[in-house]
Image (cartoon, rainbow, N blue to C red):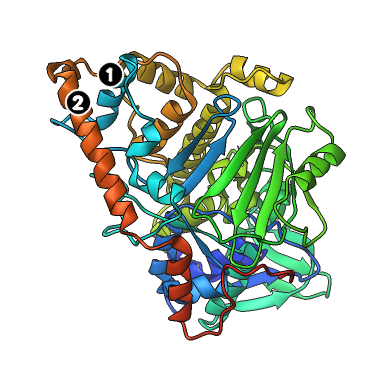
Amino acid sequence: MFNELKKIIILGGGTAGWMTAAACAKFLPENYQVVLVESEQIGTVGVGEATIPHIRYFNNMLGIEERAFLSAVKATYKLGIQFIDWGSLGAAYIHPFGSHGYPVGSIDFHHYWLSAMASGVAPAFDQFSLAVVMAEKKRFAFPETNAINGKNAFSYAYHIDAGRYAKFLRKYAEERNVVRIEGRLSHVMTDATSGAISSLQMDSGATVEGDFFIDCSGFRAILLAEKLSVPFDDWSNWLLCDRAVAVPCERVEPPKPYTVAHAKPWGWQWRIPLQHRTGNGMVYSSSAITDEDALQNLLTNLDGYPLADPNFLKFTAGRRKKNWEKNCIAIGLSSGFLEPLESTSIYLIQQGILKFLEYFPGTGDLSTLRDAYNNEMETEYVRIRDFLILHYKITKRNDSEFWRYCQNMALPESLERSIELFRATGHVERYQNGLFMSPSWLAVYLGQGVGKVNFDTRVLNYPDAFVLGEMQKMREKLELQVQAMPMTNDVLEAELSATGINQQPVAASLYGVV
């Protein structure tokens, strides 16, 4: 029974390990002991420099004050992601944290837009999103609510230094009695009868015993995969990119309130603006370009002077077939990896933690809880997988073998169904569980051009002049709202100044590597 498990062992630090430790320290009863085992000699991937709005909920849940967080992790505000050259060369759109337009006569706005588009009179879909207009004009204001649905609603997230976030949460966790053990793992011991993990044997000769183990050991998945032999579900036939190289550089301009994802013939390049530097990386298929050429292309496209040696990563898109086996849960890269195209790495860590806490401590048969947890995490991964594949599938690009393959590849049945439903009716398939609601799907469908799309015929009951008039009112209202907002950089500097911590101007170019 869960309520008999009193000692929780977390293997691995980094973002996943310390997010888990911080949440356990906050929410588990005082009679539970939480121990985190890590080695300073083993580096971390540092995933998740770009986040989505859910991180604000996680921080609020822990009682973390936003201004202190902004200062500690060198964060900047993020309103969405700009996609360049994805639908076709020369085209760009922003996937915002917010809706486009608002319903008219109980019919969703995008149906009116599709009707106007069919008549050749529709302005760009982007221009009906408050978050997009804010991002393009580099202005920012805090939303009245956290919701991202409704009339011109929007939300925001952050660009963060993932290494600093891990250190910030380590301090938080250790102040709340999480015990950290420094050392390298030698062997994992299991119970001879049940096969459950019983202890970790360290190089030093020490033994770390526990009742429940959380695997945050990164791509190796030392506990879940290497010891408990949970197989991997490989999705690389849909998500071709299997390499990444990252290089931070000097920041040469005030940070923009959005991430940039620029499609290339072999994958795509990211640009993430922080207070003290710009994060850059190339995500690519090793069958389409060599590591050396990928690095050279990345270095050629940096905004500023590189601040560190390149960091190469190898990965396979997919997930463990179970996130929880016996007395072990994998959280973070040990549970699976989906490329950072939509900034979902920290979200998946967060969901793994929150769903664990929902069930822990529980009573009854552990197998029931395991099955429920595994089913819910599978749903999370599949929803994100389909949404990422969508970006590669709906494109007019045929300038490389990479994009020709993406255009013609067979899709998971779930995604095929969603695309066909949208083309046939203009309606986004809705689901209750999992990430990415209708506004996100609409942003990509219409931003990249999904092809001919039918629309709700009820919009034909409204005269064209009325529809165009309503659209014009929406655009004018958005422009006035945004024009009244301060510049993003001014808001950020004001928030940092309010912490009372001496800050260098965010607009400055900083050459130090942190």
Quadrant location of the N terminus in the rendered image: bottom left
Determine whether label 1 and label 2 are within 8 Å by CB: yes
For label 1, the SS is helix
Return the x and y of residue 57 as percentages of the image width and height.
Answer: 39, 61
The type of residue carrying mark 2 is: Val
The disc at residue 125 is none
The answer to whether one can see residue 152 in this image is no
Specify whether 235 is left or right of 463. Answer: right
Circle 1 or circle 2, nearest the eye? 2
| Closer to us: 213 or 412 | 412
User: For the residue carrying disc 2, how many other residues have a C-alpha within 10 Å: few (<14), some (14-19), or many (20+)?
Assistant: some
Which of disc 2 and disc 1 is earlier in sequence? 1
Q: Can you say whether 302 is above or below 357 in the image?
A: above
Q: Position of residue 350 (x, y in %)?
A: 49, 56
Q: Look at 63% across and 49% down and name the residue there.
A: 271
Name the residue that disc number 1 marks. 115
Q: Which residue is drawn at 65% across and 54% down?
A: 193
User: In this orientation, does residue 317 appear?
Assistant: yes
With respect to residue 331, does 4 lie above or below? below
Q: Label 1 to label 2, Cα distance in Å?
A: 9 Å
Label 1: how many Cα within 10 Å (few below 14, some 14–19, many 20+): many
The image quadrant of residue 305 is bottom right
Picture layout, residue 121 above or below residue 35: above
Q: Is residue 222 left or right of residue 419?
A: right
Name the residue type under label 1: Ser
With respect to residue 310, does 283 lie above or below? above
**366 or 293: nearer the eye?**
293
Residue at image coords 24%, 32%: 471
Report the quarter where the C terminus lies: bottom right
Q: Residue 467 carries which label?
A: 2
